[in-house]
Structures are given as C-alpha cells and as structure tokens.
Image (cartoon, rainbow, N blue to C red):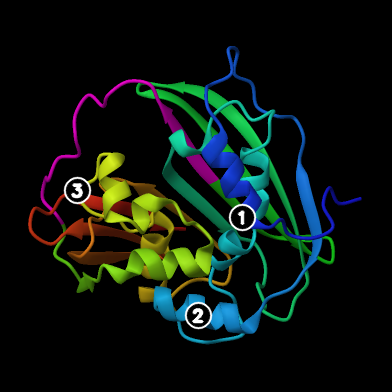
C-alpha cells in the first residue's frame, strides 16, 4: 500500500523545513520509502512548466517534468524527523535522470522516494535522493539528486579554463527565479528574494539548477533518443539576470553539453546524454 494517498501539500513542509535546526549526532538516513500512486498530469501546469523552461507543448513529458511532480514527496521525506540534516543547509550538486520508457501526459504514475548512499565528501557529507516513476508496474523513469551538507569551505572555485564556443547565447531574466519557483514548488528564497539571497551569501537571486538542466534539454528537444540517461553537475550559480552561453557537441546518439558564464567562461553546469 502507498505510504500516502495523495501528493503532500508543500505549505506545511516548508514550515517544517524553516523550523528544523541542528544535525543528528550520529547521522543515518531513514530506511523508509515514501510512495504515492494514481498521480496524473495537470495539463495547465505542464503547459506553464513548458513555457518557463522552453519546451514545446506535446503529449510526451520532458524528462525533467516528473521531478517537479514528485518534489512534494521528496520534501516530505527530507523534512521528516528521521532525516539527519536540515533541508535548508543542503546544496543540490548533481542530478541524474534515466528515461526508461514512454512518459506520456495521459499516464497515471506511481512515485517512490528514498534516501541512500550517505558518504563523506572533501567539503562535508553527500547523499542521494532517489525518485522512481512506474506506469502499470513498469519502471519508466528514475531520478537521482545528489545533495551536499557542507561543513568546510571549498579548496578552490571552478576555473574558467577554455570555455566551448557557444551554440547559443541565452539572456536569463531576473523573473526566471520566481517563474520556476511557481511551476516547480521549489520556493527557496535564494531564488526569489534578493534580500534573503544575500543572507545566504549570494549578491543576487540565483536560477534553480533544475531550471538550467531543463533549459538545456529543451535546446536539444527533437534530437534525443527514446530512452537515455542525462547527467549534470551544478557548478557556479547563475546570478540573475545573466547572459550565459550554451554549448552542445554530439557524441554518437548522445550529447556533451554545458552552460558557461557569458563573460568569464566559467561553468554553471556540465552535462551529458547517453
């Protein structure tokens, strides 16, 4: 039986996240898995998401869309009393999505979320939040989000190196933070409030990493295999507004791609499709 009979409401989860303080003395990940079945797609919400991220309106879901649909379930797991870290201290550093079957907007999805792979990192501790989607018992999608609980400063920033010649130049307006927050449910104030972004060490609001990933896949739309894995690492945040370069190089039936600062060439995101 599913753990919950419907997708959780985000309001109480954000209040729980805001009130959470302290780290468990002996951190361990919860062994439970949260599941919910019978999740259907709201076509108006899908259309709004497509507009914000640059996708065409179509019956097939973008690979990143189930991530936002299942986001409340992940939030419920990560704000539980048995989760060892406060949500507001975690940094989303990487995301891997596996498209294993058709993602149709007419389907009824069952989602499951679990935490795994607690491990040391040179800047603290990392863990994975793994979300899966099945249709009629068949696994069609898996998402692995890697989070860092930072306890020490980085040994050094991302170097500029030789940035690839961009295939396109994107002007990312300030409103992207609020627009993506509205369609994703991820209302972390570093994306929506300049004042609170400064409290967390950013001179301006920053774009969501998952918006940047989605925007890259939108740029590759129509040129992706039927089934594939797309891996990205989130590097330097995109301070809004911004001008960035998008580059993509074909690798067989896949791609190597990235987003770089328009002036310095320093990477915001690196990724690959295989």
Q: Compared to 118, does 92 lie above or below?
A: below
* Residue 92 pos. (x, y %): 43, 43
Q: Residue 99, percent across and down? A: 59, 62
- Is residue 54 at all visible to an observer of this figure? yes
Which residue lies under the disc numbered 3? 203
Q: Which mark is residue 32?
A: none
Give the label, 2 or 3, closer to the camera.
3
According to the picture, the residue beneath numbered tag 1 turns out to be 11
Magenta range: 145-163
Q: Residue furthest left?
A: 263
| Residue 252 shown in magenta | no
Decide which of tag 2 and tag 3 comes sooner along the chain. 2
Q: CA distance from mark 3 to mark 1?
A: 27 Å
Please indicate whether residue 122 sits to the left or right of residue 16 in the image: left
Q: Residues within 10 Å of mark 2 (few under 14, many from 20)?
A: some
Give the distance between the C-alpha atoms of the residues marked 2 and 1, in whole angstroms. 21 Å
Compared with 63, 3 (above or below) is above
Nearer the camera: disc 3 or disc 1 = 1
The label nearer to you, 2 versus 1, is 1
Q: Is residue 160 magenta?
A: yes
**Identity of the residue drawn at 37% across and 47% down:** 233
Foreground residue among 269 and 90: 90
Q: Secondary structure at mark 1?
A: helix
Q: In the drawing, does residue 107 fall left or right of residue 250?
A: right
- Left or right: residue 190 compared with residue 119: left
Could you say where residue 227 lies in the image, as x and y percent from the top left?
58, 66
User: Callout 3: few (<14), some (14-19), or many (20+) C-alpha neighbours within 10 Å?
Assistant: some
Instruction: Tell me the SS state at disc 3.
Output: loop
Instruction: Determine which residue is flagged by label 2.
Output: 48
Q: Residue at x 68, y 53 (%)?
A: 132
Give the residue displayed 27% in from the left and 54% down from the top. Answer: 194
Q: Secondary structure at mark 2?
A: helix
């Amino acid at each position: 039986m599913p753990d919950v009979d419907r997708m959780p409401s985000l309001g109480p989860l954000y209040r729980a996240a805001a009130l959470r303080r302290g780290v468990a003395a002996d951190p361990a990940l919860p062994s439970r898995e949260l599941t919910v079945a019978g999740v259907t797609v709201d076509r108006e919400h899908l259309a709004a998401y497509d507009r914000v991220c640059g996708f065409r309106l179509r019956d097939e879901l973008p690979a990143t869309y189930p991530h936002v649909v299942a986001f409340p379930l992940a939030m419920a797991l990560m704000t539980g009393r048995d989760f060892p870290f406060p949500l507001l201290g975690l940094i989303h550093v990487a995301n891997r999505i596996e498209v294993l079957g058709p993602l149709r907007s007419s389907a009824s999805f069952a989602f499951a979320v679990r935490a795994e792979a607690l491990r040391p990192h040179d800047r603290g501790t990392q863990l994975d939040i793994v979300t899966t989607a099945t249709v009629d018992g068949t696994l069609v999608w898996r998402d692995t989000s890697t989070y860092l609980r930072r306890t020490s400063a980085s040994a050094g920033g991302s170097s500029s190196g030789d940035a690839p010649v961009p295939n396109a130049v994107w002007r990312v307006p300030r409103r992207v933070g609020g627009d993506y927050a509205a369609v994703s449910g991820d209302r972390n104030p570093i994306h929506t409030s300049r004042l609170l972004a400064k409290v967390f060490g950013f001179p301006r609001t920053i774009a969501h990493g998952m918006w940047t990933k989605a925007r890259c896949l939108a740029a590759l739309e129509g040129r992706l295999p039927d089934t594939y894995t797309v891996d990205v690492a989130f590097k330097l945040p995109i301070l809004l507004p911004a001008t960035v370069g998008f580059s993509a190089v074909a690798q067989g039936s896949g791609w190597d791609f990235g987003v770089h600062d328009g002036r310095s060439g320093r990477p915001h995101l690196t990724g690959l499709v295989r």
